[in-house]
């Protein structure tokens, strides 16, 4: 029970204590898995960018948008900010503008009055879109060697696991964690659930010839930091205090972990927000999940302003499966009457269905080897 609730506790697919969302999240956890592209998941981004450029697209980086122009009820252009590589440059949209910066930032770019003029209720929801309950804190460790898991003694499969959860110490602890999150209690929430990625377990390219590897650990914590006077506290001593405590938490489940640390870097929610304007308050999923911000109550892909579309703050959450971007692309293509093309005929699950046996073969072999070793 404790382990199954872990992804749900990270508020990845719903609010654990909200009606229906908790049950959905637990059911989804039974199918929850992950994968890694060779060389890291940025390889997927690189593949999409390469395809875009090779097919005639133009990509501008370091170009934050200052506003979206709306003329006669239709999104017609974007204007870059003064800090952009091309300050004040204006780009007209022939068919569509897709916003990936979330509800609040999209409202700012379009203008609150403009949005109220077409849909007052949606404008209010965007203005008060909840973002501050789930702030990501991420640690990157450089280790000399692999993680010395304590559980190797009874679970040899963990040595080849990419994704590992440090789950709760008890079922009561799982419930208390959710209450502490709702109460915005940072320290009581801390250390309960850590999502750990060991890239080198599945990708040899992630391990140096000397045996060094990077381990990533992520927790979600309330953003407000009311107990230390406000969110400005993320730039204070709590950054190092949380890092030190996370070292200890990892050492408790992998004795000797601290001795293998060569270097470590801590990202707080405010750091993440500074590098990603869509991740307001460190919320990287496009908004908190609550009874009024789930599934059909997320942002619509097709906005009421003509030619304006959303790919952030929608359902499902973005993550590295790129589902929200794919859905947005389909809707834009449908509205532009270019969705029905002979080359666009694949289905997202087809490849996994055809290759499922090959994908799970290493797990079957490891389980069989473990059973054989335990036989007298």
Image: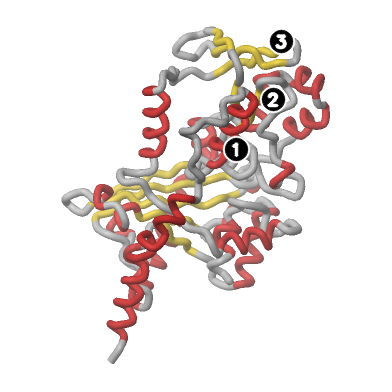
| Mark nearer the viewer, 1 or 3 | 3
Q: In the image, is residue 88 above or below residue 46?
A: above
Q: Which residue is mark 1?
A: 281
Q: Separation of disc 1 and disc 3 at Cα? A: 32 Å
List x then y, in percent, for residue 143: 28, 53
The residue at 72%/22% (across/down) is 305
Q: Separation of disc 2 and disc 3 at Cα? A: 16 Å
- Crowd around label 2: few <14 · some 14–19 · many ≥20 (10 Å): many
Left or right for 361, reference 272? left
Q: Dot 1 lies on which element?
A: helix
List x then y, in percent, for residue 60: 44, 18
Total count of labels: 3
List x then y, in percent, for residue 59: 44, 20
Q: Which residue is mark 2?
A: 107
The residue at 58%/37% (across/down) is 327
- Crowd around label 3: few <14 · some 14–19 · many ≥20 (10 Å): few
The residue at 58%/10% (across/down) is 92
Q: Nearer the viewer, residue 154 or 261?
A: 154
Q: Dot 3 lies on which element?
A: strand
Farthest bottom residue in view: 376
Left or right for 250, reference 260? right
Residue 237 visible within the image: no
Q: Dot 2 lies on which element?
A: helix
List x then y, in percent, for residue 87: 50, 8
């Amino acid at each position: 029970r404790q382990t199954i609730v872990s992804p749900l506790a990270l508020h990845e697919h719903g609010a654990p204590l909200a009606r229906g969302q908790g049950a959905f999240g637990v059911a989804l956890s039974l199918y929850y898995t992950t994968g890694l592209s060779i060389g890291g998941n940025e390889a997927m981004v690189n593949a999409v960018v390469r395809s875009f450029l090779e097919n005639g697209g133009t990509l501008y980086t370091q170009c934050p948008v200052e506003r979206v122009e709306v003329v006669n009820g239709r999104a017609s252009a974007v204007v870059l900010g003064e800090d952009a590589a091309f300050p004040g440059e204006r780009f007209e949209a022939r068919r569509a503008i897709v916003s990936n910066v979330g509800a609040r930032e999209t409202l700012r770019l379009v203008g609150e009055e403009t949005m109220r003029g077409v849909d007052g209720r949606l404008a209010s929801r965007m203005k008060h879109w909840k973002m501050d309950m789930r702030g990501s804190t991420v640690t990157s460790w450089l280790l000399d060697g692999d993680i010395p898991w304590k559980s190797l003694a009874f679970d040899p499969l963990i040595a080849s696991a990419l994704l590992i959860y440090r789950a709760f110490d008890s079922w009561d602890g799982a419930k208390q964690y959710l209450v502490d999150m709702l109460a915005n209690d940072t320290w009581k929430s801390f250390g309960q659930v850590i999502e750990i990625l060991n890239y080198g377990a599945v990708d040899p390219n992630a391990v140096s010839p000397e045996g060094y590897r990077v381990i990533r650990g992520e927790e979600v914590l309330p953003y407000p930091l009311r107990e230390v006077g406000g969110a400005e506290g993320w730039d204070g001593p709590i950054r190092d205090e949380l890092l030190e405590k996370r070292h200890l938490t990892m050492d408790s489940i992998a004795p000797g972990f601290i001795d293998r640390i060569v270097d470590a870097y801590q990202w707080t929610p405010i750091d993440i927000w500074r590098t990603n304007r869509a991740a307001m308050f460190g919320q990287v999923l496009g908004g908190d999940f609550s009874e009024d911000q789930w599934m059909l109550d997320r942002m619509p892909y097709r906005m009421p302003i003509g030619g304006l579309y959303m790919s952030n703050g929608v359902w499902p959450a973005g993550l590295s499966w790129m589902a929200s971007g794919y859905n947005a692309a389909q809707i834009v293509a449908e509205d532009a009457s270019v969705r029905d093309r002979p080359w666009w005929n694949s289905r997202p699950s087809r490849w996994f269905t055809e290759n499922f046996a090959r994908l799970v073969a290493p797990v079957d072999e490891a389980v069989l080897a473990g059973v054989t070793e335990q036989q007298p």
